[in-house]
Image (tube, helix red, strand yellow):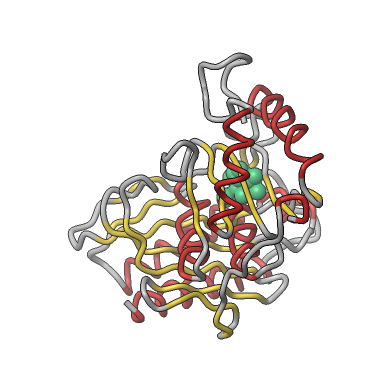
Amino acid sequence: MSELVAVAERIAREAGRLVLEGRPETVGVAATKSSAVDVVTAMDLASEDLVRRMLAELRPHDAILGEEGGHRSGTSGVTWVVDPIDGTVNYLYGLPAYAVSVAAVVGEPTPATWTALAGCVHAPATRETWTAGRGLGAHLDGRRLTVAAAPPLGGCLVGTGFGYVAERRRAQARVLAAVLPRVRDVRRMGAAAIDLCQVATGRLDLYYERGLQPWDLAAGALVVTEAGGVVAGLRGAPAGSGMTVAGASERVAELARILEEQEADAPDGPGGESG
Ligand code: IPD
Ligand code: CA
Ligand code: CA
Ligand code: CA
């Protein structure tokens, strides 16, 4: 297990160096995906290429699932789930909250079915590196992390994020309007993997977001759970492409109830897919 953590960290650091040092003055948009604001830069692609090359050398029998390059099968049962730049819009604008996220999982590489073994979220611009290994705890730059008991919901600082498609954002704005008056404040910092790690670090009490992809979640969710926190969906569902809620367990349950009230996890509910 610790070998997998070391591989995740080595690769995330190497790719992080590439994206930090290779960042031009003006970052261009190489392509768009689900909408005009869902962008890919040349560095997203270069970072994922580097990760794939390193994995081919270090772990040739493992499978890979990456945001930009899709799935490559393997024979070992281990899949590396990779976000080559989480926080691409921050990267585009020169904001520091972006990271390379690398995790090793076994089982189908979706949050509902995988068992995460190891993960690293490396934020090169802030020089912070979170690591976690199953049963080995979670660390920020070598310091062991423990999710603290959160204050009552009204005193909680809550992170969230938004998708790239207008219809989803309308629904997310409605849910945000219900959450915001009931908590200390809300932050939208722009990189899901870092948001999860901030929960483990105590810089956010809670985090929720709908529509996360496996590469947004794999490493960061392991960091939270290894720090003693909970990462869950609504109504007993696993975290993932539905709603994801992370934090100390009793607060996760409380926030989940509010999100459920908003029908946040009901794609066919009033107003269409929401949350
Ligand atoms: C996005 C970021 C963002 C979150 C979006 C993700 P990307 O990932 O994590 O914070 O709100 O849901 O898609 O596209 O920058 O890798
Ligand atoms: Ca991402
Ligand atoms: Ca990405
Ligand atoms: Ca993206």
Q: Is residue 40 left or right of residue 37?
A: left
Q: Is residue 92 left or right of residue 224?
A: right
Residue at 78%, 59% in the rendered image:
95
Whether residue 81 appears in this view of the structure is yes
Query: Image height check: is 213 above or below 3?
Result: above
Q: Nearer the viewer, residue 80 or 155?
A: 155
Residue at 46%, 43% in the rendered image:
240
* Quadrant position of residue 161: top right
Residue at 77%, 32% in the rendered image:
177
Task: Name the residue furthest bottom.
Answer: 142
Q: Position of residue 138 (x, y in %)?
A: 50, 75
Image quadrant holding the C terminus, namely top right
Image quadrant holding the N terminus, namely bottom left
Query: Image height check: is 1 above or below 200?
Result: below
Query: Image height check: is 7 above or below 218?
Result: below
Residue at 65%, 54% in the rendered image:
206
* Quadrant position of residue 248: bottom right
* Quadrant position of residue 46: bottom right
Query: Image height check: is 260 above or below 255?
Result: above
Q: Position of residue 225 (x, y in %)?
A: 47, 64
- Which quarter is ligand 4 in? top right
Q: Position of residue 228 (x, y in %)?
A: 49, 68
Q: Nearer the viewer, residue 184 or 173?
A: 184
Q: Position of residue 158 (x, y in %)?
A: 71, 52
Q: Nearer the viewer, residue 14 or 133?
A: 133
